[in-house]
Image (spheres, helix red, strand yellow):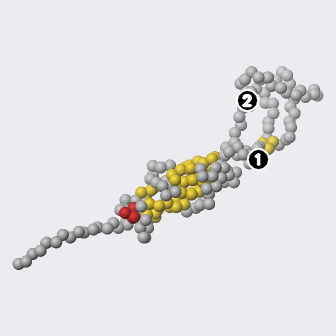
Amino acid sequence: MKTSTAIVNIIVTDVNDNDPAFDPTLPINFTVQEEEANAFVGQVKATDPDAGINGQVRYKLLNHAGFFRINSDGSIFTMVPLDRETRSRYMLVVEAWDGAPDPRRTTTRLFVEVIDVDDNSPVFSQASYTVSLPENSPPGTAVLRLSVSGAACSASAFARDPPWVGSNEDLNFKRAAAH
Protein backbone atom coordinates (compact mmCIF):
# COMPACT_ATOMS: atom_id res chain seq x y z
CA MET A 1 0.00 0.00 0.00
CA LYS A 2 1.41 3.29 -1.07
CA THR A 3 0.44 6.64 0.46
CA SER A 4 1.31 10.19 -0.27
CA THR A 5 0.74 13.45 1.46
CA ALA A 6 -0.17 16.77 -0.09
CA ILE A 7 -0.91 20.19 1.31
CA VAL A 8 -4.08 21.60 -0.12
CA ASN A 9 -5.01 25.26 0.29
CA ILE A 10 -8.68 26.07 0.09
CA ILE A 11 -9.61 29.69 -0.48
CA VAL A 12 -13.12 30.66 0.36
CA THR A 13 -14.18 33.69 -1.63
CA ASP A 14 -16.69 36.12 -0.27
CA VAL A 15 -20.09 36.19 -1.88
CA ASN A 16 -21.53 39.66 -2.25
CA ASP A 17 -24.58 38.97 -0.11
CA ASN A 18 -24.87 42.18 1.95
CA ASP A 19 -26.27 45.56 1.00
CA PRO A 20 -24.43 48.64 2.18
CA ALA A 21 -26.17 50.07 5.25
CA PHE A 22 -26.29 53.75 6.19
CA ASP A 23 -25.44 54.62 9.79
CA PRO A 24 -28.83 55.29 11.42
CA THR A 25 -27.25 57.34 14.23
CA LEU A 26 -26.12 60.10 11.87
CA PRO A 27 -28.45 63.08 11.29
CA ILE A 28 -30.61 63.35 8.19
CA ASN A 29 -31.60 67.03 8.60
CA PHE A 30 -29.03 69.66 7.67
CA THR A 31 -28.89 73.42 7.22
CA VAL A 32 -26.72 75.50 4.95
CA GLN A 33 -26.47 79.26 4.59
CA GLU A 34 -27.58 80.57 1.23
CA GLU A 35 -25.19 82.22 -1.22
CA GLU A 36 -22.25 79.97 -0.36
CA ALA A 37 -20.69 77.72 -3.01
CA ASN A 38 -18.62 74.76 -1.77
CA ALA A 39 -20.16 75.01 1.70
CA PHE A 40 -20.09 71.85 3.82
CA VAL A 41 -23.64 70.53 4.30
CA GLY A 42 -23.16 67.26 6.19
CA GLN A 43 -21.90 63.71 5.90
CA VAL A 44 -23.31 60.22 5.42
CA LYS A 45 -21.61 56.94 6.27
CA ALA A 46 -22.50 53.49 4.97
CA THR A 47 -20.76 50.20 5.70
CA ASP A 48 -20.84 46.79 4.04
CA PRO A 49 -19.63 43.70 5.95
CA ASP A 50 -18.64 41.84 2.77
CA ALA A 51 -14.89 41.28 2.24
CA GLY A 52 -12.62 42.93 -0.32
CA ILE A 53 -14.14 44.98 -3.10
CA ASN A 54 -17.55 43.61 -2.18
CA GLY A 55 -17.36 45.68 1.02
CA GLN A 56 -15.93 48.89 -0.44
CA VAL A 57 -18.66 51.54 -0.38
CA ARG A 58 -19.06 54.40 -2.86
CA TYR A 59 -21.59 57.25 -2.86
CA LYS A 60 -23.62 59.10 -5.45
CA LEU A 61 -26.33 61.78 -5.38
CA LEU A 62 -29.38 60.64 -7.34
CA ASN A 63 -30.94 64.11 -7.51
CA HIS A 64 -29.96 67.80 -7.31
CA ALA A 65 -26.49 66.95 -8.62
CA GLY A 66 -26.25 70.43 -10.14
CA PHE A 67 -26.60 71.99 -6.68
CA PHE A 68 -24.77 69.52 -4.42
CA ARG A 69 -21.86 67.08 -4.68
CA ILE A 70 -20.75 64.14 -2.54
CA ASN A 71 -17.16 63.04 -1.92
CA SER A 72 -15.86 59.49 -1.60
CA ASP A 73 -16.00 59.81 2.22
CA GLY A 74 -19.71 60.78 2.16
CA SER A 75 -19.17 64.51 2.73
CA ILE A 76 -21.78 66.66 0.98
CA PHE A 77 -21.08 70.19 -0.27
CA THR A 78 -22.97 72.85 -2.20
CA MET A 79 -21.79 73.28 -5.79
CA VAL A 80 -23.33 76.71 -6.38
CA PRO A 81 -24.65 79.53 -4.21
CA LEU A 82 -28.20 78.65 -3.14
CA ASP A 83 -31.00 81.23 -2.94
CA ARG A 84 -33.60 80.73 -0.21
CA GLU A 85 -36.11 82.97 -2.01
CA THR A 86 -35.97 80.56 -4.97
CA ARG A 87 -36.00 77.33 -2.94
CA SER A 88 -35.85 76.90 0.82
CA ARG A 89 -35.59 73.08 1.17
CA TYR A 90 -34.01 70.22 -0.71
CA MET A 91 -34.59 66.51 -0.30
CA LEU A 92 -31.45 64.67 -1.39
CA VAL A 93 -31.38 60.98 -2.28
CA VAL A 94 -27.96 59.44 -1.65
CA GLU A 95 -27.10 56.04 -3.05
CA ALA A 96 -24.42 53.80 -1.55
CA TRP A 97 -23.17 50.82 -3.55
CA ASP A 98 -20.41 48.28 -3.10
CA GLY A 99 -17.50 47.60 -5.46
CA ALA A 100 -18.62 44.17 -6.67
CA PRO A 101 -18.99 43.54 -10.43
CA ASP A 102 -22.72 43.19 -9.79
CA PRO A 103 -23.05 45.78 -7.00
CA ARG A 104 -25.65 45.85 -4.27
CA ARG A 105 -27.20 49.27 -3.62
CA THR A 106 -29.17 51.13 -0.99
CA THR A 107 -30.44 54.70 -0.66
CA THR A 108 -31.23 57.19 2.06
CA ARG A 109 -32.98 60.55 2.08
CA LEU A 110 -31.50 63.72 3.56
CA PHE A 111 -33.20 67.07 4.09
CA VAL A 112 -31.36 70.36 3.63
CA GLU A 113 -32.86 73.67 4.74
CA VAL A 114 -31.38 76.83 3.25
CA ILE A 115 -30.87 79.55 5.87
CA ASP A 116 -31.74 83.04 4.70
CA VAL A 117 -29.19 85.82 4.39
CA ASP A 118 -30.63 89.33 4.59
CA ASP A 119 -30.12 90.05 0.88
CA ASN A 120 -33.45 91.68 -0.02
CA SER A 121 -34.58 94.99 1.37
CA PRO A 122 -38.14 95.16 2.67
CA VAL A 123 -40.62 97.35 0.81
CA PHE A 124 -42.85 99.60 2.91
CA SER A 125 -46.41 100.24 1.75
CA GLN A 126 -45.84 104.03 1.91
CA ALA A 127 -42.80 106.19 1.20
CA SER A 128 -43.35 108.27 4.36
CA TYR A 129 -45.62 108.24 7.40
CA THR A 130 -47.12 111.09 9.45
CA VAL A 131 -48.48 110.45 12.93
CA SER A 132 -50.31 112.75 15.34
CA LEU A 133 -50.05 111.73 18.97
CA PRO A 134 -51.82 113.58 21.79
CA GLU A 135 -49.35 114.65 24.45
CA ASN A 136 -51.40 113.00 27.18
CA SER A 137 -51.30 109.55 25.53
CA PRO A 138 -50.54 106.83 28.08
CA PRO A 139 -47.28 104.90 27.81
CA GLY A 140 -47.56 101.91 25.53
CA THR A 141 -50.04 103.58 23.17
CA ALA A 142 -49.69 102.21 19.64
CA VAL A 143 -48.38 105.02 17.48
CA LEU A 144 -48.07 103.52 14.01
CA ARG A 145 -48.65 100.23 12.19
CA LEU A 146 -46.25 99.57 9.32
CA SER A 147 -46.90 97.24 6.43
CA VAL A 148 -43.87 95.61 4.84
CA SER A 149 -43.64 93.23 1.89
CA GLY A 150 -40.99 91.71 -0.32
CA ALA A 151 -38.91 88.56 -0.78
CA ALA A 152 -37.11 89.08 2.53
CA CYS A 153 -40.42 89.11 4.43
CA SER A 154 -40.75 85.38 4.98
CA ALA A 155 -41.34 83.20 7.98
CA SER A 156 -37.65 83.56 8.82
CA ALA A 157 -37.84 87.36 8.91
CA PHE A 158 -38.33 89.02 12.25
CA ALA A 159 -38.50 92.50 13.70
CA ARG A 160 -35.92 93.90 16.07
CA ASP A 161 -36.27 96.72 18.52
CA PRO A 162 -34.53 99.87 17.34
CA PRO A 163 -31.15 100.48 18.98
CA TRP A 164 -32.51 103.22 21.26
CA VAL A 165 -35.07 101.02 23.01
CA GLY A 166 -33.99 100.68 26.61
CA SER A 167 -31.44 103.49 26.38
CA ASN A 168 -31.53 107.05 27.64
CA GLU A 169 -30.98 108.63 24.24
CA ASP A 170 -33.32 111.37 23.04
CA LEU A 171 -35.60 110.61 20.13
CA ASN A 172 -35.94 113.41 17.62
CA PHE A 173 -39.29 113.73 15.89
CA LYS A 174 -40.48 116.36 13.50
CA ARG A 175 -43.57 117.93 15.00
CA ALA A 176 -46.61 117.89 12.75
CA ALA A 177 -48.88 120.91 12.57
CA ALA A 178 -51.87 120.82 14.93
CA HIS A 179 -55.24 120.21 13.32
Residue 150 marker: 1
Q: Is residue 18 visible?
A: no
Q: Is residue 148 visible?
A: yes
Which of 111/37 is in front?
37
| Residue 114 pos. (x, y %) | 63, 49
Q: Quadrant of the N terminus?
A: bottom left
Q: Quadrant of the C terminus?
A: top right
Q: Secondary structure at mark 2?
A: loop
Indicate whether 115 appears above or below 146: below
| Mark 1 / mark 2, whichever is N-terminal | 1
Which of 138/3 is in front?
3
Indicate whether 142 appears above or below 119: above
Disc 1 crowd rating (10 Å Cα; few below 14, some 14-19, many 20+) is: few
In this rendering, the label closer to the viewer, 1 or 2: 2
Which image quarter: residue 121? top right
Query: Which residue lies at the image location 29% right of the left edge and 67% below the top edge?
Result: 12
Residue 163 marker: 2
| Residue 109 pos. (x, y %) | 53, 56
Query: Which residue lies at the image location 78% right of the left edge and 27% below the top edge?
Result: 141
Query: Which residue lies at the image location 44% right of the left edge and 56% below the top edge?
Result: 46
Q: Are marks 1 and 2 in contact (CB under 8 Å)?
A: no
Gap between marks 1 and 2, in whole Å?
23 Å
